Image (cartoon, rainbow, N blue to C red):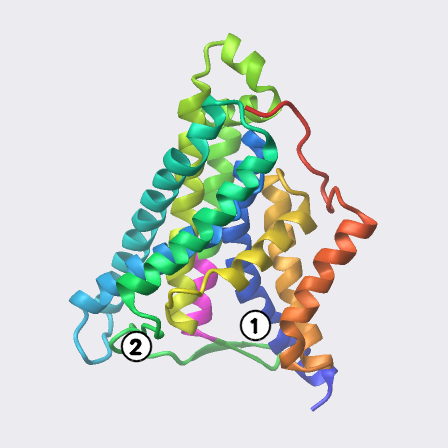
């Protein structure tokens, strides 16, 4: 079948994976907003969130496929536990890999090296704790089936669950950043950390909150990702790099830019994988990163500029 015949199905599939990229990308863009550094260990926060959600569900889920209220409850349990595991991982990461460097006024290169080291340590720790094989759910959380069609594209229950959950998280974060006191503090620190401190904002507390919020999103996103691809000790690298690409594409430091970049990258990957080959999906994503850095390094909506905390 030609591209035209598959266009709507590719769009649905690309939007689903793009929503997950957007959820992960928000962690990169939030941290960059307040510290102007790339948290390359964020991919392991995503991985620990997936592990936390999947292992919890495996512990409570029966060996048969759940249905009705049981399915909803299991998904909620997995999301909550995944989010909490991601938040804990992000909190520990900030305390051990970044805070000591901030207190010593370390150069930016030290942050990068620390992030890479923390990423390698986290992945190998997970391999030691959980094994180096994929960890699937005991059984499907719900009986996946086609709910409706958009033109000739099938929209499954799994797609709806992932999209609705991801969109809800993105909307909540946008409202939190734009309409709450905490969000105002985050925006103030992102704009000018020194002035925010003089105005009474506890910069250290805001940095911790920023890491934890990013961890909550990444952890929940990790569980959603594991619904389709299972969980594993090294699952964070490829989605993490793609989420970073999405953040750069939208304008790193810009929350809404991360959403647009994630959805855009998901669609580009879906269309490109069909036109060339599914084996080239990762190549296409990394090519997008290179092209964005060469042509428009500030991204589609422009990056956040200010003085870092």
Quadrant location of the C terminus?
top right
When the figure is inspected, residue 188 is found, relative to residue 21, above or below; the finding is: above
When the figure is inspected, residue 275 is found, relative to residue 44, above or below; the finding is: below
Judged left or right of residue 69, residue 230 is right
Q: Which residue is mark 1?
A: 13
Residue at (25% x, 57% y) in the render: 77
Residue at (24% x, 76% y) in the render: 138
Looking at this view, is 115 or 190 the one in front? 115
Quadrant location of the N terminus?
bottom right
Q: Position of residue 287 (x, y in %)?
A: 73, 63
Is 162 covered by the magenta stretch? yes
Q: Position of residue 133 (x, y in %)?
A: 34, 75
Q: Position of residue 278 (x, y in %)?
A: 63, 80
Which dot marks residue 140? Answer: 2
Residue 149 seen in the current view? yes
For marks 1 and 2, give the CA distance.
20 Å
Judged left or right of residue 261, residue 90 is left
Judged left or right of residue 186, residue 296 is right
Residue 169 seen in the current view? no
Count of residue discs: 2
User: Which region shows up in magenta?
Assistant: 156-165
When the figure is inspected, residue 93 is found, relative to residue 6, above or below; the finding is: above
Secondary structure found at label 1: helix
């Amino acid at each position: 079948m030609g591209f035209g015949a598959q266009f709507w199905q590719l769009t649905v599939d690309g939007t689903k994976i793009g929503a997950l990229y957007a959820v992960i990308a928000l962690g990169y863009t939030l941290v960059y907003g307040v510290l102007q550094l790339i948290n390359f260990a964020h991919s392991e926060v995503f991985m620990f969130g997936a592990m936390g959600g999947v292992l919890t569900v495996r512990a409570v889920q029966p060996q048969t496929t759940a249905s009705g209220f049981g399915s909803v409850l299991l998904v909620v349990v997995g999301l909550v536990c995944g989010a909490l595991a991601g938040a804990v991982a992000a909190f520990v990461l900030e305390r051990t890999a970044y805070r000591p460097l901030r207190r010593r006024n370390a150069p930016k290169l030290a942050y990068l090296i620390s992030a890479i080291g923390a990423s390698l340590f986290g992945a190998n720790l997970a391999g030691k704790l959980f094994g180096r094989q994929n960890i699937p759910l005991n059984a499907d959380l719900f009986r996946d089936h086609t709910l409706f069609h958009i033109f000739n594209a099938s929209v499954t229950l799994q797609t709806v669950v992932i999209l609705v959950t991801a969109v809800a998280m993105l909307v909540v974060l946008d409202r939190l950043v734009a309409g709450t006191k905490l969000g105002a503090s985050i925006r103030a620190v992102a704009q000018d950390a020194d002035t925010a401190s003089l105005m009474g904002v506890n910069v250290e507390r805001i940095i911790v909150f920023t890491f934890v919020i990013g961890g909550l999103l990444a952890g929940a996103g990790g569980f959603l990702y594991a619904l389709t691809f299972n969980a594993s000790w090294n699952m964070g690298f490829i989605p993490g790099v793609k989420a970073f690409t999405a953040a750069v594409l939208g304008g790193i430091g810009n929350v809404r830019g991360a959403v647009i970049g994630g959805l855009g990258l998901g669609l580009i990957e879906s269309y490109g994988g069909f036109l060339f080959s599914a084996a080239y999906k990762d190549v296409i994503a990394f090519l997008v990163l290179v092209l964005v850095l060469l042509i428009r390094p500030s991204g589609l909506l422009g990056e956040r500029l200010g003085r870092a905390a």
